[in-house]
């Protein structure tokens, strides 16, 4: 479904959420909401894909945007743009990086713990790996995540996880 919307910004007075967003009318959002699943995949100008949950706000829904996307597409606040929205039926609400998939497939215990996490925590871990472009760094993060899941019996401690990531990065130097 293609809709026209604008790039807007919450103010501190209007919302506790402060940032760039695309307002989505209720009539559009309702087509994509299925119980607790509000995940959508949006294509902007055929160049950028945002995977997100639809978020409610005083009479409408919205999809968050960040400054790097705004700059990449050269979109000004208030500018009308076209969003192509579709339901995100992917397993985790984002693409699973190959490096993390391989590590989890090799470590059954870690995979069991990963699958027991909430969808949001699963996406957090996936995002940690996706945010780096270097394959070796992605492998190191994946190794650290698998080790952390096993060590913590599925309980996440992001401070400890960051220490493990640093440790695995040092090992590869």
Image (cartoon, rainbow, N blue to C red):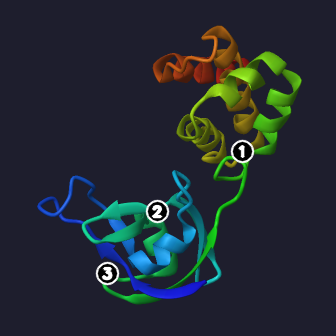
Where 98 falls versus 34 (above or below)? above
Disc ID at residue 77:
3
Q: Quadrant of the C terminus?
A: top right
Cβ atoms at labels 3 and 1 below 8 Å apart? no
Q: Nearer the viewer, mark 1 or mark 2?
A: 2
Q: Which residue is mark 2?
A: 54
Where 107 falls versus 93 (above or below)? above
Sequence-first tag of 1 and 2: 2
69 sits left or right of 49 in the view: left
Q: Nearer the viewer, mark 2 or mark 3?
A: 2
Q: Position of residue 115 (x, y in %)?
A: 70, 30
Can residue 172 be seen at all in this image of the molecule? Answer: no
Image point 58% across, 64% down: which residue? 40
Sequence-first tag of 2 and 3: 2
Can residue 30 be seen at all in this image of the molecule? Answer: yes
Q: Position of residue 34 (x, y in %)?
A: 56, 60
Q: Position of residue 19 (x, y in %)?
A: 31, 62
Q: Nearer the viewer, residue 83 or 119?
A: 119
Image point 70% across, 36% down: which residue? 137
Q: Which residue is mark 1?
A: 134
Where 126 falls versus 78 (above or below)? above
């Amino acid at each position: 479904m293609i809709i026209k919307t604008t790039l807007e910004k919450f103010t501190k007075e209007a919302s506790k959420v402060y940032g760039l967003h695309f307002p989505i009318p209720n009539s559009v959002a309702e087509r994509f909401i299925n119980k607790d699943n509000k995940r959508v995949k949006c294509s902007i100008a055929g160049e950028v894909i945002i995977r997100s949950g639809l978020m409610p706000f005083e009479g409408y829904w919205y999809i968050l945007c960040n400054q790097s996307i705004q700059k990449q597409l050269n979109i000004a606040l208030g500018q009308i743009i076209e969003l192509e929205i579709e339901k995100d039926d992917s397993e985790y609400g984002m693409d699973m990086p190959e490096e993390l998939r391989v590590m989890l497939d090799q470590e059954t215990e870690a995979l069991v713990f990963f699958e027991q996490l909430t969808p949001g925590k699963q996406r957090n871990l996936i995002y940690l790996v996706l945010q780096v472009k270097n394959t070796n760094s992605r492998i190191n993060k994946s190794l650290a995540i698998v080790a952390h899941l096993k060590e913590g019996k599925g309980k996440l401690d992001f401070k400890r996880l960051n220490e493990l990531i640093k440790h695995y990065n040092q090992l590869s130097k």
